[in-house]
Amino acid sequence: AAALVPAARRHFPDATILATTSRRTGAGATARIAADLAGGPHRLFRWGDAGPNPYAGFLAWADALIVTADSVSMLSEACATGRPVLIAGEAPGRHAALAGSLCDAGYASRLSAPGLPHPAAPLDESARVAARLRELGFA
């Protein structure tokens, strides 16, 4: 959490940062992110805040996305947008394997890397699986 907002500001110094925490984000990390965001234009949605979760809107409006490495769902959803995706931090096991494969395939890059990735077409695994099932005669 301590490195997340400063790294985002290095990549996007003039950006309005749209941020959301998750149910796994601890109180200390949330407080740190909020404090770091306070110095610039932003919108922070803390997990459990009243009102609808703006996550889907954040995905729709973002020019680029930064996602922590510990969420398979959020990494997949970010890569499905077709926008540049930067992966923050490290995570063990299947999370590390997913992050590595997304970077290797050009869908994302590490937040610690310079510049922005130039994403391939939006990741669409559902369509790929459906096409394969049709090929196999399951449709």
Image (cartoon, rainbow, N blue to C red):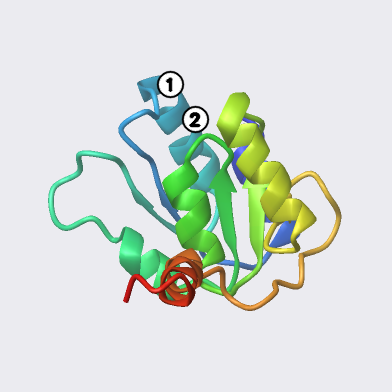
How far is the residue under mark 2 from the one under mark 1?
Answer: 6 Å
The residue positioned farthest toward the left in the image shown: 51
Q: In which quadrant of the rendered view does residue 59 lie?
A: bottom left
Residue that appears at 46% across and 27% down: 29
From this viewpoint, is residue 8 visible?
Answer: no
Q: Say left or right for 67 vs 52.
A: right
Q: Relative to 111, does residue 43 appear above or below in the rendering?
A: below
**Circle 2 residue:** 32
Q: Relative to the observer, which residue lies in front, 58 or 103? A: 103
Q: Identify residue for label 1.
A: 28
Whole-percent x and y of residue 32? 49, 30
Badge 2 amino acid: Arg
Q: Which residue is drawn at 57% across and 35% down?
A: 95
Category of crowding for the residue at label 1, using alpha-carbon neighbours closer than 10 angstroms: few (below 14), some (14–19), many (at least 20)? few
Structural crowding at the residue carrying mark 2, measured as other residues with C-alpha within 10 Å and reported as few (<14), some (14–19) or many (≥20): some
Task: Please name the residue shown 65% across and 34% down the image.
Answer: 96
Find numbered disc 1 in the image and state the secondary structure of the residue it sits on: helix
Q: Which mark is residue 36?
A: none
- Secondary structure of the residue carrying numbered label 2: helix
Q: Does residue 110 lie above or below 77 as drawn?
A: above
Res 23 quadrant in image: top left
Q: Quadrant of residue 1?
A: top right
Q: Quadrant for the C terminus, please.
A: bottom left
Residue 71 spot, x, y in % from top left: 47, 40
Callout 2 touching callout 1 (CB < 8 Å)? yes
Left/right of residue 100 with respect to residue 55 in the rendered view: right
Q: Locate residue 134, reporting x and y percent.
A: 41, 76
Of residue 50 and residue 131, the one placed in the foreground of this image is: 131
Residue 72 vertical placement versus 84 (above, below):
above
Badge 1 amino acid: Gly
